[in-house]
Image: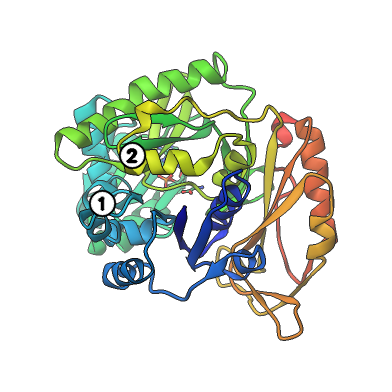
Amino acid sequence: MKILVLGPGAREHAIVLSLLSEDAEHSIVCAPGNAGIAASGVETVDLAFTDPDAVTKFVSDRGFDLVIVGPEAPLVAGVADPLRAGGVPVFGPNADAAQLEGSKAFAKRIMDEAGVPTGRAAKVASAAEAGAVLDEFGAPYVVKADGLAAGKGVLVTEDRDAAIDHIATWAPHGEVLVEEFLDGQEVSLFFFADGHDVVALTPAQDYKRIFDGDQGPNTGGMGAYSPLPWLPGGTEAFIEEIKRDVAIPTVRQLESEGTPFIGLLYCGLIVTSKGVKVIEFNARFGDPETQVVLARLESPLSAYLLASANGELASLPAPTFSDEPAVIVVLASEGYPGDVATGREITGLEAAEAVTGVHLVHAATARTQTGGWIATGGRVLGVVSRGQSFAEARARAYSALNEIDLEGGQFRTDIAERVA
Ligand code: AMP
Ligand code: GLY
């Protein structure tokens, strides 16, 4: 197949590597991609990938059998809409269905209509009414800005003044929700969706905070592992429950409203003492969870993406996953998730990749003129490893990280420790 992957990050690198690992040969283009994706032998094209007109023109010029939209920004901007209208198979929802991620208030309404279990929430229009709402919900306070905020819109805090400040910051930009605090382990579970049917992938757990022990501010994700051996009732029962109670009702609700969801339904869940609840939906593969989920996927990814795009998921068997655990540890630049120092040299990538069971996914790297590497952003790259046990996968990931030098580079040392 001729496949276009849209997006610049490590998630897209993982998608590309999964497509390259299939028995069938594909011709893959990634736009804009990154230096790591190019180093994997894939053509990268500088393209305004969040601009529907630019993407439509590129697709009609070059011709593709399948377009995969990686990040949320192009989806919310409506990149999928004209492609789908023009008959191109696209994996990624139209802008209206992408509101499931683009608007927390929209997602709450869909969940309410569909009877999906989630935390209680109240809208706050201004800082003036914030105090009363916060007191009604009690600490810890959960405050969420409505729109896309690149991970900065959600604040979970014991500090009432900080919660009020967060509301004051975001209220001028749109709705703000105060939500019931949900206590428990987080699970990310992805479903392929074709507008009517869904097919589950396998659960993963993401580490959102910057420092060990889940301390410090939220990030885009500092690591992940899969599978989750501690799931109540085991993996199969858990997947069935979430499919029945969350994914199917959500997809059917969107279908009934004339906004079918075709793409990746990311269910962000918390396993509370009162059952599993949804904390968020995303309309695309999660980063960095995708890197461990696809590292375990044995079935051909492209078949599921194409069947989703064509409304034919019901014709496919459930995908299979390796029993071997997978772990990713993310290397970030100094200062992340605040202002980062960039342009610093990275060495040791070849030695890292030579560690058994390890591969790298790049997020923000560039080549130097002499063939070396520099870091160009916050989350720089991920070290993905597999092993016969979590202990082995962890040992491999951290020994690979030991080979890598980046001045001021930071990574968590406790990824998957709780399961090893
Ligand atoms: P979100 O962008 O909605 O996924 O929120 C980012 C992170 O904030 C989540 O991964 C959770 O760690 C945390 N969070 C969000 N909502 C809640 C909630 N209702 N209770 C507890 N933690 C939450
Ligand atoms: N890992 C969290 C996300 O992709 O939103």
Amino acid bearing label 2: Glu
**Residue behind label 2 places its C-beta within 8 angstroms of ligand 1:** yes
Task: Give how far across and how far down residue 50 sits, in percent.
Answer: 35, 67
Q: Residue at x 37, y 32 (%)?
A: 313
Task: Give how far across and how far down residue 248 sits, in percent.
Answer: 31, 26
Q: Residue at x 41, y 51 (%)?
A: 154
Task: Give how far across and how far down residue 308 sits, in percent.
Answer: 36, 39
Q: In the visual, does 233 lie left or right of 78?
A: right
Q: Residue at x 44, y 55 (%)?
A: 70
Residue 94, numbered circle: 1
For disc 2, the marked residue is 179
Q: Residues within 10 Å of mark 1 (few under 14, many from 20)?
A: many
Residue 140, numbered circle: none
Please name whichever residue, 134 or 296, is drawn nearer the observer in this view of the structure: 296
Q: Residues within 10 Å of mark 2 (few under 14, many from 20)?
A: many
Label 1: state its secondary structure.
loop
Tag nearer the camera, 1 or 2: 1
Q: Quadrant of residue 243?
A: top left
